[in-house]
Image: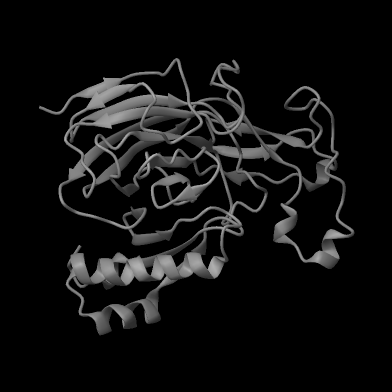
Amino acid sequence: MPQTHEIVATEYYRTFAKFHPVLATIQPGDSVVTKTLDSGGQDLHDEHLHEPGNPLTGPFYIEGAEPGDSISVRLDKVRLNRNWGYTSVRLGLVSLTPDHVANVFSNDYKMDLVRKDRSDMLPWDIDLGRNVVSPRHPESPSQVREFPAQPMLGCIGVAPEGEFTPTSGPSGPYGGNIDYNMIREGAVVHLPVCQPGAFLYVGDGHALQGDGEPLGNGIETSMDVEFSVTLNKGKTIAGPRVETDEFIISVGSQPEFASSLNRGLQLATTDMVQWLAADHGFEDWAAHTLVGMVGQYDVVTVAGSMALRVPREHLGGQG
């Protein structure tokens, strides 16, 4: 019978690696109830448990997973568990035209609002009862806006092929720091298995984040997370895929600045037409025209990844 593993890490890691001590070994079908730190290493009690830089919860060893398989991670809960978070103060300059960058406002905002000796961070209040977020200590109170929270996980991935041990900063075909705001409660994330046991990691919760993560972060905060894992024997996939109630989604996952967004678009589109043909019964020409008519592209990260969504209603009852 499937089991539920309730476990909170005491050690966290900043690499998607196969050599870290296993946090829990789980059977396919099991559920995990756990917690993640914010990107700065703080937990729900505001204790600093790790250095900044997207500390990861895991690894989780999936029994029976082998290279050439894939896993499906169903995010049953992605819940806010504290009343504050933080972001940068201004957009990443890569998001702006060079002529505007020359006149952009200073990143030096207010000292010590979030971290001691840091003046470039803006704290946010998270109203857990109303599920809304709003900036704290604004420069101009009349400019304050309140937004509905949409909790998501920035990091989800497995140990990649070979001896490669990427940090929790970039993303790639193994997943990683994808920072896609559709990876939220109720979504299923499909990942390739590159090492025996997969070595699954999660982390980097955001209370809210716009498309592309143009600030360089979302509202960084800690999370309560519950997920279950399905093992797909012999089903090889090239990179991350996401499913929601409304869409199937291919993610052209690549590190920021490694290549153009056009490359991310090509990766996502290629994977989608292959997915439609292999799993949903589409002939090649039908897959191409479906993407051409109803496909929806998302900028996942500025100067990085792209995603392609196809609405389920157009899958012709194939699922």
Q: Position of residue 82 (x, y in %)?
A: 55, 25
Look at 40% across and 73% down and name the residue there: 295
Look at 27% across and 30% down and name the residue there: 61
**Image quarter hosting the N terminus:** top left
Q: Position of residue 155 (x, y in %)?
A: 47, 40
Look at 70% across and 46% down and name the residue there: 145
Q: Position of residue 229 (x, y in %)?
A: 25, 38
Q: As drawn, is 108 to the left or to the right of 162?
A: right
Q: Residue furthest front?
A: 163
Work out whether residue 33 or residue 237 is closer to the camera in this orientation and state it.
237
Q: Residue furthest left?
A: 1
**Image quarter hosting the C terminus:** bottom left
Look at 66% across and 44% down and name the residue there: 146
Q: As drawn, is 93 to the left or to the right of 9?
A: right
Q: Which scheme is used to colour this image of the protein?
A: one colour
Query: Is residue 178 visible to us here?
Result: no
* Residue 111 quadrant: top right
Q: Position of residue 115 (x, y in %)?
A: 73, 25
Number of marks in the rendered image: 0
Looking at the image, is 201 positioned above or below residue 242? above
Looking at the image, is 215 positioned above or below residue 299? above
Looking at the image, is 189 positioned above or below residue 123? below
Query: Is residue 267 visible to us here?
Result: yes
